[in-house]
């Protein structure tokens, strides 16, 4: 699985509970990694059709987990972009307020 991007600097604006959402996405990424690690073939004396069926199903699950991992990484990038935008908006609002008081 891919490594998640580092978090942006702390956001004073804390828009829309982005910090909590980011934490939940990171938790989901951990769950995906654990699920992927659990998809190892059991050490049983099996072969033939049963083994091929298990391998096919496990491969399909790994593929789904990889897509989910990429989607969650995309969520992190978007949450980080939202945080950066909120910081910029907050700075603009503070500057406008300061200019209005002057």
Image: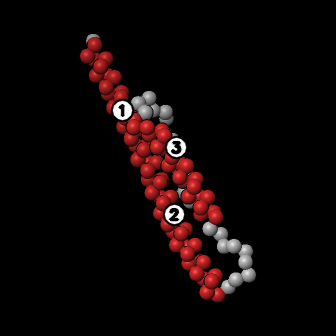
Residue pushed farthest bottom? 48
Of the two numbered discs 2 and 1 on the same chain, state the one appearing first in sequence.
2
Of the two numbered discs 1 and 3 on the same chain, state the one appearing first in sequence.
3
Disc 2 is placed on an element classified as helix
Badge 3, how many Cα within 10 Å: few under 14, some, many 20+?
A: few
Q: CA distance from mark 1 to mark 3?
A: 22 Å
The image quarter containing residue 51 is bottom right
Query: What label does residue 23 carry, if any?
Result: 3
**Image side of residue 86 versus residue 69, left or right:** left
Residue pushed farthest top? 102
Q: CA distance from mark 2 to mark 1?
A: 33 Å
Image quadrant where one finds the N terminus: bottom right
On screen, residue 100 above or below 14:
above
Residue drawn at (42%, 44%), measured in percent from left and top?
Answer: 79
Depth check, front residue: 8 or 71:
71
Residue drawn at (63%, 63%), measured in percent from left and top?
Answer: 37
Query: What label does residue 56 carry, if any?
Result: none
């Amino acid at each position: 699985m891919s490594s998640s991007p580092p978090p942006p600097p702390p956001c004073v604006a804390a828009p829309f509970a982005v910090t909590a959402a980011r934490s939940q996405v990171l938790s989901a990424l951990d769950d995906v990694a654990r699920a992927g690690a659990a998809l190892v073939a059991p050490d049983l004396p099996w072969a033939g059709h049963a083994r091929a069926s298990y391998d096919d199903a496990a491969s399909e699950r790994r593929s789904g987990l990889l897509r989910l991992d990429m989607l969650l990484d995309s969520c992190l990038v978007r949450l980080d972009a939202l945080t950066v935008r909120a910081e910029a908006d907050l700075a603009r609002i503070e500057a406008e307020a300061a200019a209005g008081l002057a």
